[in-house]
Image (cartoon, rainbow, N blue to C red):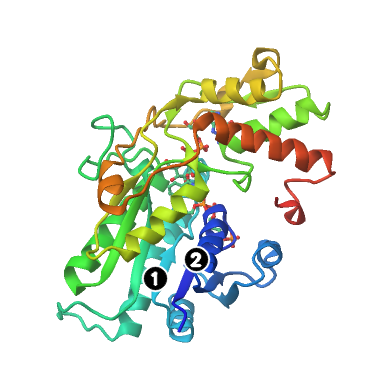
Amino acid sequence: MARRALITGITGQDGSYLAEHLLAQGYEVWGLARGQANPRVSRMRKLLADVQVVRGDLLDQGSLISAVERVQPDEVYNLGAISFVPMSWEQAELTAEVTGMGVLRMLEAIRVCSGVSRGSNTRSGQMRFYQASSSEMFGQVAETPQTERTGFHPRSPYGVAKAYGHFLTQNYRESYGMYAVSGILFNHESPRRGAEFVTRKVTLGVARIKLGLASELRLGNLEARRDWGFAGDYVRAMHLMLQAAAPEDYVIGTGRMKSVRELVEAAFTAAGLDWEQYVIRDQTLHRPAEVDLLCADPKKARVQLGWEPTVSFDDLVAMMVESDIRLLSNGGDPDQDSSWP
Ligand code: NAP
Ligand code: GDD
């Protein structure tokens, strides 16, 4: 019988790549979708016709229990979150509820449905749980590069909520013997990345300028540095983590850092443009507390999981610029759900 996976965050960037990867491995894939008439669900159904949808919301404990009871998954991937860091200052409580408490609700749904009682410490149930932890937890970094042992100093309500989810996942593993792991993933991007994140904002901006649809691009802090990889590579790591003999946490990244300025240069160059003629620095886009740099040491994942990234920074940027030029040339609107490439 096919193995069964339940993915929260199915309408997001990672949900789509993970679903494709698991379907290709022969899994029966279920996606948890929220809302009464969520247009992102119809967009997802077009791209991923073989994914089955179960209704639920990370804010609603009962709905998660019902979803787990109905699907009876072998593996649960918790990717659902408020994931845009600036939004976490504007809606800190909602971020705590979805990105933080949502992890507790998902773990409780699995615990209850597996029949694990408080106080028992046996290796429980068969369901394996993956939590989408984040390099944002490192925040003001204690050391560079960051490993699984580096301490956390989150700089945003989002980072704090992710740290809660991370420790809780560890705690359920230790308290109940659950197979529950966290992937501490560094920034990963793709043509399906949300338009609010800096890589996609830049590649869409470049495409608009190239096609004469815009004349400038406003950006915040150009000096921040990130370890950027390709989302398609990172979802392979999520799956590998749940196939390991023992439940452990892993750092996933490329080990290479680039600044936002270098990202901008690479994207404009890929379209044959000079970025300095178009980019405007906008102080209002700076964050209350910035994460200045992030750089992964993915050695543990390489050695124990055999995981390697396959797409370089330059190839990733070129892929996104080409995709956005094609999208806009064909009359697509990235803000319209039907135009998801
Ligand atoms: P994304 O594109 O922003 O997707 C977020 C998903 O969360 C969407 O499917 C959204 O569904 C869902 N969601 C939001 N609120 C929800 C709720 N109340 N109940 C259920 N689902 C809800 O994020 P992503 O880039 O794919 O990232 C996936 C996960 O990895 C996130 O947890 C993110 O924080 C984490 N992460 C991402 C990166 C990265 O660089 N991409 C790095 C480290 C960690 P709707 O369509 O209903 O809004
Ligand atoms: N979004 C955005 N827009 N960021 C900008 C801009 C701008 O106009 N100008 C400069 N930046 C800088 C931000 O200040 C930040 O330092 C960097 O670009 C990256 O910003 P984002 O692309 O928004 O990503 P992030 O690093 O804050 O968060 C992403 O990666 C995390 C993993 O480290 C998200 O995917 C999180 O969900 C994820 O956990």
* Quarter of the image that includes the N terminus: bottom left
Question: Around disc 1, counting alpha carbons within 10 Å, would you say few (fewer than 14), some (14 to 19), or many (20 or more)?
Answer: many
In the foreground, 15 or 24: 24
- Judge from the rendering whether residue 264 lies leftward or rightward of residue 337; answer left or right: left
Q: Disc 2, ligand 1: is the CB inside 8 Å?
A: no
| Amino acid type, residue under disc 2 in the picture | Leu
Q: Position of residue 117 (x, y in %)?
A: 22, 84
Please state the horizontal and vertical placement of residue 328, each as a whole percent of the image: 79, 40
**Residue 203 figure quarter:** top right
Name the kind of residue labelled 1 in the image. Answer: Met
Instruction: Decide: is 265 above or below 238.
Output: above
Vertical relation: 168 (above or below) 292: below
Compared to residue 148, the image places residue 224 above or below, namely: above
- Discs 2/1, front: 2
Nearest the viewer among 248 and 96 is 248
Q: Which mark is residue 273?
A: none
Residue 216 appears left or right of 113: right
Provide the residue designation for mark 2.
22
Q: Is residue 209 left or right of residue 29?
A: right
Q: Residue at x 42, y 78 (%)?
A: 73
Does residue 201 appear in this view? no
Q: Is residue 37 left or right of residue 130?
A: right
Residue 71 locus on image (x, y percent): 48, 82
Marks 2 and 1, how far apart in space? 20 Å
- Of residue 209 and residue 308, the one placed in the foreground of this image is 308
Residue 96 locus on image (x, y percent): 41, 56
* Element class at badge 2: helix
How many numbered callouts? 2
Find disc 1 in the rendering and name its residue. 106
Residue occupying the point 34% across, 76% down: 127
Sequence-earlier tag: 2 or 1: 2
Q: Which quadrant would residue 273 be assigned to in this image?
A: top right
